[in-house]
Amino acid sequence: MTHPATSSSSMVSSADVNGTAVYSPNGEHLGHIDHLMIDKESGVIAYAVMGFGGFLGMAEDHHPIPWKKLNYDPSLGGFVTDITREQLEGAPPRDENWRDDRNWGAATYNYYGIPPYWM
């Protein structure tokens, strides 16, 4: 498996994104990408589901964040976001049908300060 940092291509496999670290702008490790959520109709990556908290993967929380809030930084070998740990912990609650709930999606994108991917 090729890590995003070692590839010279502008394309990356979702398999290589999974597990990639996520950092704050000051270099604090916030978590990692668990998986991506792709809108089937538009083909747009809507969310990166980020794992954070817990210890050695136990009691880890997972939260979808808008894909556009991540920028890859080759010097870190991971993604950088301006989302704080406190924002992750205070994100809009979701139920088991969050994937199909446009109201939750709009509230989440608004919470993170960007327009929804479908607009």
Image: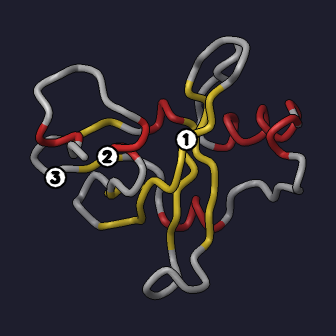
- Quote the CA–CA distance across marks 3 and 1: 20 Å
Residue 118 lies, in percent from the top left, at: 70, 16
- On the picture, is 79 further left or further right than 50? left
Residue 101 lies, in percent from the top left, at: 88, 36
Give the residue type at disc 2: Phe
Please, is residue 91 above or below residue 6 in the view? below
- Quote the CA–CA distance across marks 2 and 3: 8 Å
Q: Crowding at label 2, few (<14), some or many (≥20) Cα neighbours within 10 Å?
A: many
Query: Which tag, 3 or 1, sits closer to the chain's start?
Result: 1
Give the residue type at disc 3: Leu
- Which residue is denoted by mark 3 in the rendering? 76
Query: Which tag, 2 or 1, sits closer to the chain's start?
Result: 1
Q: Which of marks 3 and 1 is in front?
A: 1
Query: Foreground residue, 41 or 22?
Result: 41
- Which residue is denoted by mark 1 in the rendering? 36
Say which quarter of the image contains residue 107.
top right
The disc placed on residue 113 is: none
Badge 2 element = strand
Q: Which quadrant would the C terminus be assigned to in this image?
A: top right
- Which residue is denoted by mark 2 in the rendering? 79
Give the residue type at disc 1: Leu
